[in-house]
Image (cartoon, rainbow, N blue to C red):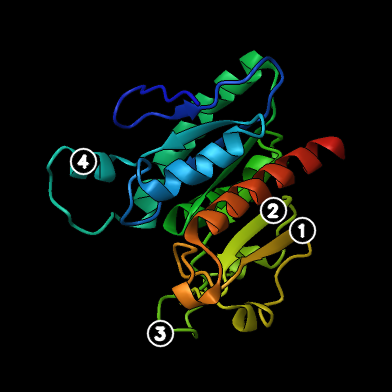
Amino acid sequence: MFLLSCGPNSPTPDGLQGHGAPHLLLTHGASQPVTSPFFDAITAAIAERGIAVHRFEFAYMAQRREGGSRRPPPRIATLLPEFVDAVEAVSRISEASGGALFIGGKSMGGRISSLLAEDLFQQCKIRGWAGISYPFHPVKKPEKLRTAHLLDLRCPSLIVQGERDPFGTPEEVSTYGLSSQIALTWMPDGDHDLKPRKRSGVTWDTNLTAAGDAIADFIWSRLRQS
């Protein structure tokens, strides 16, 4: 593993790989930085499978890290251009190394990256999208769905979700009519952080590693199909 800091608001690659290795640009949710134990575990599992992972942190989260206010994140429309800039930066890295680019994120970061995925895929800038703990709806507001853009998605996609995630359970998600291009992988008894209850017989480490493995499998399978 290798973590390269390119500044508080820059993509940071883990697991630098050889020429031709795929790249994954991954960003965080509303409240956790990209240096959380959650991200450390998932990026380790992905990078160990030969994928260069670039962790991207939005400006508001970088300000929190530096002792700034813990106000809620800005509106999605404000964050989208930041992620676009990150995609452009990592695109240059992946092109220089001859590797394909994938994007994704956890929770809010998954939603933001998903809103850009179709256009980026149609422009041949990315090969796929991976969402972790996707916020299908606000907690306790299942009627306010955030799925309209996921119904006709043509970009190859993967969503890794905990079975107890309050933002979308297996029972709820099965009724949404999501695009056939979206594969779903459910983490046993996992909550929004994929963390299971002690009595489940599953450990958090196991779920985090499995989530990273699922994303790596998705990326390599897409490349084998090309």
What residue does disc 3 label? 140
Badge 1 or badge 2: first in the primary sequence = 2
Q: Is residue 73 above or below residue 201?
A: above
User: Mark 3 belongs to which amino acid?
Assistant: Lys
Give the image location of residue 159, x and y in percent: 63, 59
Residue drawn where x is 69% and y is 64% of the image: 184
What residue does disc 2 label? 157
User: Mark 2 belongs to which amino acid?
Assistant: Ser
Badge 1 or badge 3: first in the primary sequence = 3
Residue drawn where x is 45% and y is 36% of the image: 55
User: Mark 4 belongs to which amino acid?
Assistant: Arg
What residue does disc 4 label? 65
Real-space Cα separation, disc 2 to disc 3, in angstroms? 26 Å
Badge 1 or badge 4: first in the primary sequence = 4
Badge 4 or badge 2: first in the primary sequence = 4
Real-space Cα separation, disc 1 to disc 3, in angstroms? 27 Å
Give the image location of residue 110, x and y in percent: 51, 54
The answer to which quarter of the image holds residue 46 is top right
User: Mark 1 belongs to which amino acid?
Assistant: Gln
